[in-house]
Image: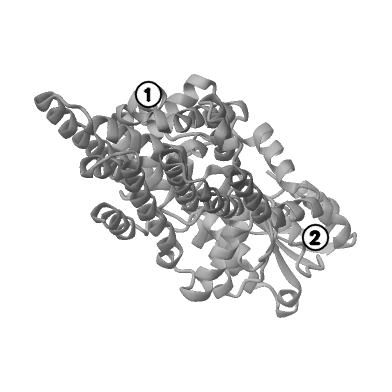
Amino acid sequence: WFLPLATLALQLATFRGYGYFRDELYYLASAEHLGFGYVDHPPLIGLVAWLIRFTLGDSLFAVRLLPAIAHATTVALTARLAREMGGARYAQSLAALAAALAPIYVGLCGFLSMNAFDLVCWASLWLLVARILRAGGASLWAPFGLVAGLGLQNKISVLFLGFGIVVGLAIARRWQVFRSWQFWAGGALAGAAFLPHLVWQWHHGWPTLEFMANATREKNVSMPPLAYLAEQVVQMSALAAPLWVAGLGALLASRRFGAFRPVGWAYLAVLAVMLATNAKPYYLAPAYTALFAAGAVTLEAVRRPVAGLWMRVGAVVLVAASGALSAPLAKPILPTEAYLRYTSAIGMAPSVGERHEMGRLPQHFADMHGWPELAVNLATVYHALPPADRKRACVFVQNYGEAGAVDVLGAPLGLPRAISGHNSYFLWGPRGCTGEVVIALGGNRHGYEELFASVEQAAMHTCTDCMPYENNVPIRVLRGLRVPFAEIWPRVKRFI
């Protein structure tokens, strides 16, 4: 338990970072709209955000406590998976250390998102599958189905894991599994747990499919297979790569891992699906707990006394060193200027995962800048309006990050709830806005002039080290809408 608790302590000691992350604000806003789904994610994260706000509030510590616990839980599950594969104390410790220090795990569990809980889900499912393969416990397919169903309510990519396991079982010729009624019952349980979200999707015209198609076509950067594989090495830490590569090789070829062969094929099947669908590289991150466990067990089994000892010590040193070197790249633990000096020294440029202009910081750090300033700037314009206009005013913004900042950080400043056409905010509608007075952040001035009798720029929002498209954005006051607001609303929809 030392490494899971140390992981939790390290996450909580560095929880502040640069401030709220864009998606955190969106999820906290989603807590006010509980339901069976959202445009760009299933419903569980909204419920989690509601529980956080209801019990702990929406401070940074409150928001980031559960993701930190999720990281610690993932570390514990990885150690348990190594034990299930036959590993003793060294293998369990090394596997746990790799999960604790993997850069992508450190980063994804540093803020509130679906991804932290996705790691726990995949690690739990790998553990259940390993137990079934080792001991033949067909009764475990029922809890597997329940965990998978809950995982699907968190993130749809759990489907990739389910597909991979089926392919792995088939390639390894474990036909007896497919003849087991418990296997099919587990699948039925997962489907039943996921059904409410599917009904929600059908009722709303399958918005997530539209969102995914738009994101693939217009936003996500397409990566060729070799670049995608190289990114896997980077996000799991280059120095630790031999550990999980050895684990994959052992799962596929070692006689010792014959019982767990489907797990190796499952990883390759999931990788193939990710490549075929142009999935973001970090979507594959939850798969590596199984490879960490197998690699650690393989290393522990080296019998040559001197060589084996040096290999075991060297693996611990490499994993620990790689984690220490990559931690500032994964989580904002350095001040901005120190971070820039560090990346310059090691020759790292800001990463580009989407088709946006980049500033000095990578997107996952830039998206932690500028939100309090945005709320203050909009509140200043709002409170400068005449009292009669303030009663009728609404705030229109361009994306869910801006809208979340208004809803979460702007509420204490007296701002009305934001409206936007971006993703779930479009489904939440105009929130009673009549269009008589609109404070608009960004957007096209000419388009506004076609719809409103008066378009007046009241301020300019600027922010340091935010994403460039969030900087130098005009704040305008629009008055005198020429057409009913209900006619305009369908035109602002943007699922991407």
Residue 427 is situated, as x and y percent measured from the top left of the image, at 75, 58
Occupied quadrant, residue 18: bottom left
Residue at the bottom extreme, as displayed: 387
Q: Is residue 33 above or below residue 260?
A: below
- SS type, badge 1: helix
Q: Tell me the quadrant of the picture where the C terminus can be found.
A: top right
Residue assigned mark 1: 249
Residue 457 is situated, as x and y percent measured from the top left of the image, at 68, 57
Q: Amino acid at mark 1?
A: Gly
Q: Is residue 404 above or below residue 109?
A: below
Residue 454: which disc?
2
Q: Is residue 114 above or below residue 219?
A: below
Q: Amino acid at mark 2?
A: Ser
Q: Is residue 449 left or right of residue 107?
A: right
- SS type, badge 2: strand
In terms of depth relative to the viewer, which is nearer, 182 or 479? 182
Residue under the point 66% across and 71% down: 416
Camera sees residue 245: yes
Q: Tell me the quadrant of the picture where the N terminus can be found.
A: bottom left
Residue under the point 54% across and 64% down: 48
Occupied quadrant, residue 70: bottom left
